[in-house]
Amino acid sequence: MLLTAAWVLGLIVVPQLRMIERAFIVDQRGDEAALVATEIERAYARVFAIDQDLLRAADGAAAPTAPSPFAPSPSSRATGAASPERTAALEAEKAEAQARIVELEAREAEIQAADRTTYALGNFTGMSRIHAWIFVSTLFYALCVTVLSFLACYPVAYAVATARRGERVALLMLGLVIPYAINELLRIFSWVMILEKQGILNGALDALGLIDMAAGEGVRFVASNGAVFVVMVYAYILFMVFPIYNTIETLDRNQIEAARDLGASAWRIHWRVVLPHAKPGIAVGAVMTFMLSAGSIAAPEIVGRGLHPDWFSQVIYRRFFESSNWNQGSAYALVLLVACVVFVLVVMKLFRVGIRDIAK
Amino acid sequence: MDGNDVALTGVSMRFGDFTAVHPTDLTIGAGEFFSILGPSGCGKTTILRMISGFLDPSSGDIAIGGRSMAGIGPNRRPTALIFQNLALFPLMTVWENVAFGLEARGVALADRKRRADELLALVALDGQGGKKPTELSGGQRQRVAVARALAVEPAVLLLDEPLSALDLKLRQHMRAELKDIQRRTGVTFIYITHDQGEALTMSDRIAVMNAGRVEQVGTGDEIYDTPASPFVATFVGEQNMFQGRVASVSGGTAVVDTALGPLHGVARGGLAAGDQALVFVRPERVGLVEADDGEAVNRVDAEVERRDLEGSFVNLFLRAGDQRISLHLTNAGAGRDVVSGRRRVGFRPADAVVMGVGEVARE
């Protein structure tokens, strides 16, 4: 009981509340604070670079006759030769940078002290038209991924669930589960290798004589939404296959046979008997796949390479780590979360699936 | 109803090394209520699945109405199967269940509805069409399954122990109802069961199966009175069984020397003097006799061990040496009065069957 409470509090309530709180904080001097923060960041980076240079200079002075084979030796010797003057110059620059940091940090503290944080909707209403469009597109893309996953996974799940021999089941399960022992990033990168212009897929087309790679022909599959979809479908296949597999497995085989005996075609058996039975599983799979793909950052970032239409998750990422605007990032993330939840509830309503069915 | 006969010629089924059904010939007439009776694992369900098309025979051919069914899938055969667990579609309403076969045939919605209503009336479920199968009782679900199968107007209806899930009272009621539906529709019924009571009460003819072989085909009376093998003799109904050696065979009557002396019975199969043999006689055909009734044949003196009251009947269990003898008497006269003591029992040679030793049903 206590454990559950701690779990719910620590893993769900606190982070979510914090994010929601951030989302509603509108930083009055957000721009200056961000600027100062960026400058502090830069100054620290400079100091670090100078330190590196100093270390190298010291190395060069101490061992000029035995340059490291790993270091670019001519330049190190050069710096080593000019070491006294150069070191002095570097020291001076470092002192200057450190002084600047002190100054900037004082200013930052000042800003923060004067900071009148207020709760408002500015972070939401301030969303640009482009971002709003990306947001809507992302929901649509996630829906595409969900539908594609379902189309890819249903036959697999059905085949596994109705396989008679235990061996076949084991084999299929291994074929699906083992890929999931591999890190998601690695799987995404391997897909990039397949889809690249010099990649395996084009190589296969070349081998079939459909294109001539030597002549520079080849389809650039990566950096398109199609490629992102493919990679995502692959990345989330298990989340779709397993729930569907689980529900189909509980279907009485006799019902399939009865339908067949009564003259139903394979299509009708699926449409009237198997699919209705598997509906809760499909709903679970769709919810998971939709949520995961709507929030996925790795696949669009790596596969897309910035050349395909942006996903909203990328926009959120940039709010946090490039614009240093965490408040707006939180607001965007919250919008995405709410939209996903609403979307899921609407879909569940449309398919007449209750939470209770999903819990089964 | 012509052309609904089912003919199996040399049909067998092997699963790897295991032979589920040895080559079998069976002819089931149009409009017949035919039962296949046997213990579990005897291959009766395999035969049913071959007729319905879910299994392809390893050898031989199945013809329905003179047309070979080889290569025709279950969805295109003129058969309908009623599953042991009924396999109703739980997410559809009762009428949708009944009309499913028509839906698969592309019948228009209005016609499907009308036909479903007719069928539900046939099985006395008028007005229940809008319910889900789970809202019905066991017997009602049973009737939905029958209606669903009849909706496709099959030439042959195959029933795989459909009554086994019902309680005894309902089972007896459904027996009569099934028989009645069969008579009214004229559809050929092939009924799979391990329950001899079901087979005997409903069937025109019965095939008794054991270990992948059909041991006997005949009417209920034939099976009961003149079993073709020790297995059939012991699987169907109760039996008193005496072991011994054939002393002589003449004019269809065999005399067997047993521990209780010579016993006379009708010889079945080729028997010769000196053969090991079994004498079977039904408990209701053994009677209590007076010690001096003047008859010397098939008389045994035995001790009454137990008397079980069944209501209108009484089971009397006697022992003579190692031999147990049971009697099935009406609860009147001696049946009511005899409780213990040493008694003489006897039976007519015409009521006893003598057979060579073979496999006996274990109960």
Image (cartoon, rainbow, N blue to C red):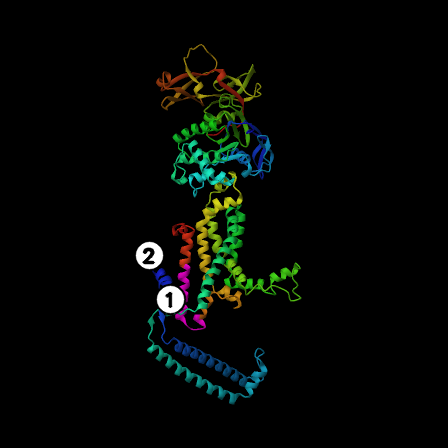
Q: Which mark is residue A1?
A: 2
Q: Position of residue A114 (x, y in %)?
A: 33, 78
The magenta region covers: A319-340
Q: Position of residue B48 (x, y in %)?
A: 53, 34
Q: Residues within 10 Å of mark 2 (few under 14, many from 20)?
A: few
Q: Position of residue A200 (x, y in %)?
A: 60, 62
Which of these two is toward me, B243 or B268? B268
Determine if residue B171 is in view: yes
Is B53 within the magenta?
no
Seen as rendered, the residue at the extreme top is: B294
Q: Give the answer, above or below, for where A165 lies relative to B249.
A: below
Q: Which mark is residue A19?
A: 1
Are the residues flagged by discs 1 and 2 from a single subunit?
yes
Query: Mark 1 touching mark 2, by CB under 8 A?
Result: no
Q: Mark 1 to mark 2: distance in Å?
A: 26 Å
| SS assignment at label 2 | loop
Which of these two is toward me, A246 or A208? A208
A120 to the left or right of A128: left
Chain letter belonging to callout 1: A
Q: Which mark is residue A273?
A: none
Give the prevailing secondary structure in the magenta stretch: helix
Type of the residue with mark 2: Met
Which is closer to the viewer, label 1 or label 2? 1
Which of these two is toward me, B105 or A341? B105
Residue B345 falls in image quadrant = top left
Residue A347 falls in image quadrant = bottom left
Type of the residue with mark 1: Met
